[in-house]
Amino acid sequence: MKNFESVTDEALALLYVEGNNRAFDELLSRTQSKLFTYIMFVVRDHDIADDIFQETFVKVITKLQNGQYADSGKFQFWVTRIAHNVIMDWYRQQQSHKTYEPNEKNDLQNLRCASVLDTYRESELINEQVLSDVKRLMEALPAPQREVVYMRYFQQLSFKEIAQLTGVSINTSLGRMRYALINMRRMAKENQMELSYAS
């Protein structure tokens, strides 16, 4: 019985392609928790997240068996991209979620997004109540904005990686983040939430 502890995800994927089903079992056990957390955060429904997770892995298996995976050293990235596509397909079918679109009343020229992002990155300790408030605000965001905030702050992905995963330009990713911040600030003000960081 082969021990897979020292085998990379990419090597496991290739072993599975060669017919080693235990390699896939190991790959699934390594991937499922992080992937399900990502899906659940975006769709916010356990049953839907289960369905999307299962469909994602059906697609992963199909793509692996069809030779559509090349070892690039980024298996997790590849799987997350597939999950993103399945989520977006599900949202397209629903056609009930609207995104916050730019208009004359929300000019972005005066927004200092870089300084806001720096504040987030530099803050190591965040008050638990503030974090709870931020999570509640994120839950109220439209799916594309919620997804980019999750990827940036919870998965620590760069905007380039977010753009690649979601299939949009870097500018679109940045735009979604800007609108997410605008929406979160507005909701915080409306709900009289004081979002200040612990020193």
Image (cartoon, helix red, strand yellow):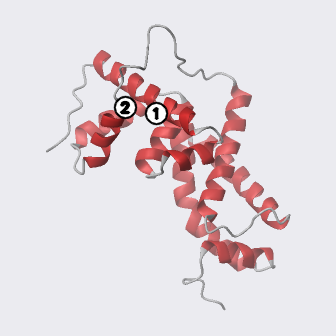
Q: Position of residue 61 (x, y in %)?
A: 77, 62
Say which element carries label 2.
helix
Q: Which residue is mark 1?
A: 177
- In the image, is 36 to the left or to the right of 135? right
- In the image, is 155 to the left or to the right of 54? left
Q: Position of residue 140 (x, y in %)?
A: 45, 27
Q: Residue furthest left?
A: 199
On screen, residue 182 above or below 30: above
Q: Amino acid at mark 1?
A: Met
Q: Position of residue 27 (x, y in %)?
A: 63, 70
Q: Residue 78 occupies which quadrant of the picture?
A: bottom right
Say which element carries label 1.
helix
Q: Which residue is mark 2?
A: 113
Q: Position of residue 179 (x, y in %)?
A: 46, 25
Query: Do the residues under discs 2 and 1 have CB atoms within 8 angstroms?
Result: yes
Residue ID at (61%, 53%): 80
In front: 159, or 136? 159
Give the alpha-carbon distance from disc 2 to disc 1, as whole Å: 9 Å
Q: Say which of marks 2 and 1 sits in front.
A: 2
Q: Amino acid at mark 2?
A: Cys
- Specify whether residue 45 is in view: yes
- Specify whether residue 140 is in view: no
